[in-house]
Image (spheres, rainbow, N blue to C red):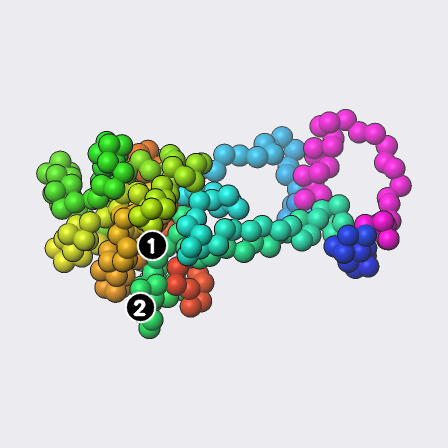
Amino acid sequence: MCSPETIMAALEGEPGRHTCPQEPPAAPMGRRQAVRAALAAVAGGLGVAAFPAGRAEAAAVAPPPHASRVLDLTHPLSPDFPVFQLYVRRPERRQVMFERVAGFNTAEWTFNEHTGTHMDVPAHSRAGLRTADLIPPQDLVVPLCVVRIAERAARDNITELTVKDIKDWERRHGPLPERAFVASDSGWYKRVADPRAYLQFDPRAQVMRFPGVSPEAAEFLIERRSIVGFGTDTSSLDVGTRREPLVHRMLLTTGRYGLENLAALDTVPERGATLVVGAAKLRGGFGAPVRALALL
């Protein structure tokens, strides 16, 4: 491990001012020995026993006992994730500790709480309502119902989830379960690598063009069904052309939450999955980044 002076010199851009003491060169070892030594060193540093001989160094993560598969509905958060910069600054990442200097790597991230796959919470629409740290845990593990509108969205970039879509879904699958989360699958997540295609900002009209949830569908879900929230695979619950966040207010002021920028909803069955929302517990947060998972 390097001295504090060496670490500071490296961070100040003068890595040559101090150097770390070097261990005497070790005798050469074979690849298998090197792997075992590295694993033993890591295990020792964590305060756990090294892997016993004959055990595999890494194993696939098994799904929970009640699930046969776990699907990730989350986009990776990165500095190039599409954001509408009128409201949200681009994420930034800066590495501040380096393995070669300090013995470990760390980075500082700066991003808006409404960036990437994230949660909108009641306080986002009205001060005094629940913040991110106060969302009940039981609302974060719920039945997931996926309503597909991707075929229509491919033809109409400002289509919305409608009451008819929901009723058609119920004719096929039965009533929405109690305390369900409803996700609108527009297929829009596939565009995320191209910010222009994902946001479709129209400078002349000063609006964006992407699908959302209609006010009528929002009212139906809130008033006529038992839901903890709903979400989209676009960057907003509201359709991109709506200037006022009407659907946000309708949902959030009732104490429910929304999820935006969901991914891969087309890999999840329309009914039968359990949604697990791993939300950052930000004290006072008006939103929070999440890791959204579907258990099948």
Instruction: Mark yes or no: residue 221 visible.
Output: no
- Residue located 76% across and 49% down the image: 101
Please, what secondary structure does the residue beneath circle 1 have?
A: helix
**Farthest-out residue, right:** 24
Q: CA distance from mark 2 to mark 1?
A: 21 Å
In the rendered image of this protein, does residue 192 appear above or below residue 221? above
* Position in image of residue 178 (x %, y %): 19, 52
Q: Nearer the viewer, residue 143 or 153?
A: 153
Tag 2: Cα neighbours inside 10 Å, few (<14), some, or many (≥20)?
some
Which residue is label 2 attached to?
Answer: 126
- Residue located 70% across and 33% down the image: 35
Q: Which residues are magenta?
A: 15-42
For residue 282, which numbered disc appears in the image? Answer: none
Q: Quadrant of residue 195?
A: top left
- Residue located 53% across and 34% down the image: 59
**Farthest-out residue, bottom:** 128
Q: Quadrant of residue 266?
A: top left
Q: Amino acid at mark 1?
A: Leu
Instruction: Mark yes or no: residue 277 visible.
Output: yes
Nearer-N-terminus badge (2/1): 2
Q: Quadrant of residue 58?
A: top right
* Position in image of residue 40 (x %, y %): 69, 41
Tag 1: Cα neighbours inside 10 Å, few (<14), some, or many (≥20)?
some
In the rendered image of this protein, does residue 255 appear above or below residue 294? below
* Position in image of residue 24 (x %, y %): 89, 41
- Residue located 31% across and 48% down the image: 205
Q: Amino acid at mark 2?
A: Arg
Please, what secondary structure does the residue beneath circle 2 have?
A: loop
Quadrant for the C terminus in the image: top left
Which residue is label 1 attached to?
Answer: 140
